[in-house]
Structures are given as structure tokens and as C-alpha cells.
Amino acid sequence: MKQDFLPVLLGSDINAYGMARSFHEAYGYKSVAVGKGRLPVILNSHIVEVQKVEPRLEEDEIFVSTLTEFAKRYEGVRLLLVPCGDNYIKMLVRNQDALRGIYEFECIDEALLMRLSLKESFYEVCEEHGFSFPKTTTCSYENYKETVLPFDFPVIIKPSNSVAYWNCKFPHKKKVFVAQDKAEYDAILDAIYGSSYKDNLILQEFIPGDDSKMRVINCFSGKDKKVKLISLGNAVLEEHSPEGIGSYAAIINGYDPKLNEMMKNFLEGIGYVGFANFDMKFDERDGKNKLFEMNLRQGRSSYFVTAAGYNIAKWLADDVIYNKPMDLTIATNKVLYTIIPTKIIFDYCPDENVKAEAKQLIREHKVINSYYYKKDRSLKRWLMFIRNQYHYFEKYKRYFNNKGLHD
């Protein structure tokens, strides 16, 4: 089959697989991937192949030379470049001038990237556009022992520089920590700053409520800087393993007109281009959604948008490849998106209303596991899928609600 273009994915995680699945569902196209390694979810796949591994891909010169050389394999083919991780979108923004004409893509400029990717400046932008967010302060490597918290415990502790944090190591490391008291808070900060991580840390008040109070929004803005797609998801359950805390394990699509309008005004107000992903939590104390962060890419769980009938690969290709004019689409269809066995949802989600909605969607056969795709089946992938699902039972049993400095 002759393809109009070839999707080139940067990364090999569940986000990359979700994008590959979206491209395959929309066009029947197989994607290729370039990344620092090969993660299990993408192995033995018929719809995506990691064709280049470069461990130093996060270095600017290596990033440009690797992608420039890789493109020579496909002379005369339109290559649609799709970053699937924070580090890759930052590399693309920084090096976009060197790659234009070789790959097809659209992205923001570096000044806006810096404003949005560092959480301190991001909250300033939020304030300018009327978003609520948790009470927040920061500390640095130089002053963390003297920092006075302007709110009570529990306290959320997370890195300001997620890429630098990803590359550091220390015992009991977690993606996000929650300190219940001062002693635990001190121990966590000592552990983080005892590693190679020396950037600022974000310190936030903990918004009460279980995982089902979390909200996720995926948006796509065209190269004309107008929002083309907004899709809200209500979390059912998050992952609870150390590396997965804060990532969504199960989502049911939602709808909130006021929030949609705020997102549209925000993205168009800052002149945004491309995918954007927002994490927030509904605060029952004042009835407001408190914004935690913005990812300058499609979210790790963004396949939930495609699963509901709004194929995100089509929005990207229609804008970048086909130059199609598009109006704004607000997602309203509902499915239960999951990467975990549904039994775990009913074992660990405490909200009876959410569980009832999940059961109804299952009865209506509106449930999709992102890992399992009928058109990408093989014995090896089936065995990988079974192992993956089984391990989730072990992970939830071991780590559920463990966000402290211990195993």
C-alpha cells in the first residue's frame, strides 16, 4: 500500500504505542520509531517498529544528526515527526530549524517552551488566565533546609525539571512524593538532593480526594494557533508503582463546557501549536478544578481520546500533512479506557458512582485496553500482554497509596 506519509515516533512507551495504534486505525499505516531504547509495549508489533536506538538522543547534536541520518532511509517519503515524551518535544523545539525540510511537524518556539515547561513560570501563566491551582511554593538545592511551607501537611513534592529528575537515581525514588509530616518531608528532600538532581522542587498542598477526582484534558491546536480538539477525561484509577504515580490507569471520558472554554481561551491566548495535555484535580472544598501541570505533547494516556471516537492521529495529519481547515471539536462520547485488568478498578476505586458507570460501559461493550489491539496480535504479544496484566495485580497489592520514601 502506498502511503501519503510515514509517522516517525520519538519514543517507545505506551504513549508511542497509542499513537501508532491511532495511525494504524485511521490509515492502516505502520509507524516507525526512534528512541533511547526499546520498551516492552512496542516489541513484536505489526504496527510500529523501533528502527533506530540512540542512548544519547537527548543531546542536541546527537538528536539532529541521528534524525538527519535516519531520514535518508526514506528519500522521497513525507515524514511526519511525532514526539511522544517531554524530553523529545523539548529537543524538537530547540532544534526545529535544523529539521525543517527533512521532517514535517509544527511546534511552539523556545521562548514559549521555557515559559510553560518550568512549573514556576507555568503557574504564573495560569494565574494570568484565571486557572486555579494548588497552593504552591518551591525550594532549591541551596535553600531547601530553610524553606518554610505556607500550608499544612500532607505536602506533594515533585521536580520542577522532569527531564533532569528522570535521569537521577536514589533509593525509593518515586515520580511524585506525598509527605505526611515534617520528618517525612525532610527525609524525602534529603534523598532527592543527595542524588544528581539539583534543580528546584515544587512543593504543593495536597488536594483531598481519591484518584477519581483527577481530571485530564488532551487538546490539539492547529498551525493557525486555533484549538481544534478538546477532550476531557475523568480518572477512575491512577497507577501506584514508584515510576507510575500520577499516570492514569483507567479513564472515563467527561464533559465540562466551562472548563473547555477556559482551555480554548488559554491555548489561543498564548498562541499554542500542537498537542497539549493538562492534569488537574477536582477540589470538593470549593468546587474548582485545580491545575497541576501542562505537558507540551499528547498525554501518556491520550489513546483514551481515540478510543472514544476522536482519532488524534487524524487531527495531527489533517493539520500538518493535508492542510485541512478544521473547526473546534469537543469530545462527548464515552468509553472506559484502561491499561489494567477491570477487576483492579473494582478492587481499588473507592467511589461507588464511578464504579457503577464503569460497569455500565463494560455491559455496553464500551471498554478498550490500550495495550490490546486485535490487529496487532501474535503469540509473543499475547504472552507479553498477559504478563503485563498479571503484574498489575502485584503492583497494586504492593504499592497502592504508597507515596512515601519507602517500598
Image (tube, grey):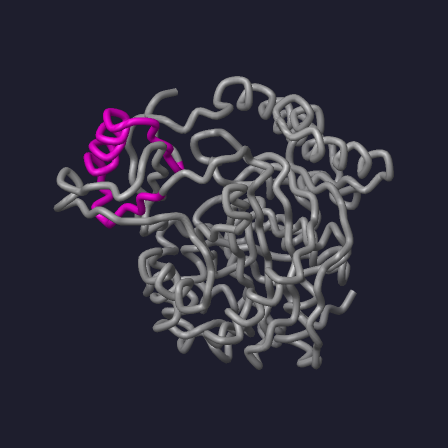
Report the residue at 52% width, 55% height from top: 278
Residue lying at the far front in this picture: please name it: 286
Instruction: Tell me, yes or no, whether the highlighted magenta stretch contains residue 74.
Output: no
Say above or below: 85 vs 368.
below
Could one spot residue 28 in this view of the protein?
Answer: yes
Residue displayed at 31% across by 47% down: 202
Q: Is residue 342 above or below residue 327?
A: above
Q: Quadrant of the C terminus?
A: top left
Q: Is residue 42 left or right of residue 205?
A: right
* Residue at x 34%, y 58% (from the top left corner): 118
Residue 181 covered by magenta stretch: yes
Quick check: 51 left or right of 47?
Answer: left
Seen in the picture, residue 384 relative to 281 is either above or below; the reply is above
Tell me where residue 231 appears, x and y as whole percent.
66, 58
Q: Position of residue 340 (x, y in %)?
A: 65, 32
Q: Nearer the viewer, residue 363 or 137?
A: 137
Q: Is residue 173 left or right of residue 390?
A: left
Q: Which residues are magenta?
A: 175-204
Q: Position of residue 305 (x, y in %)?
A: 68, 54
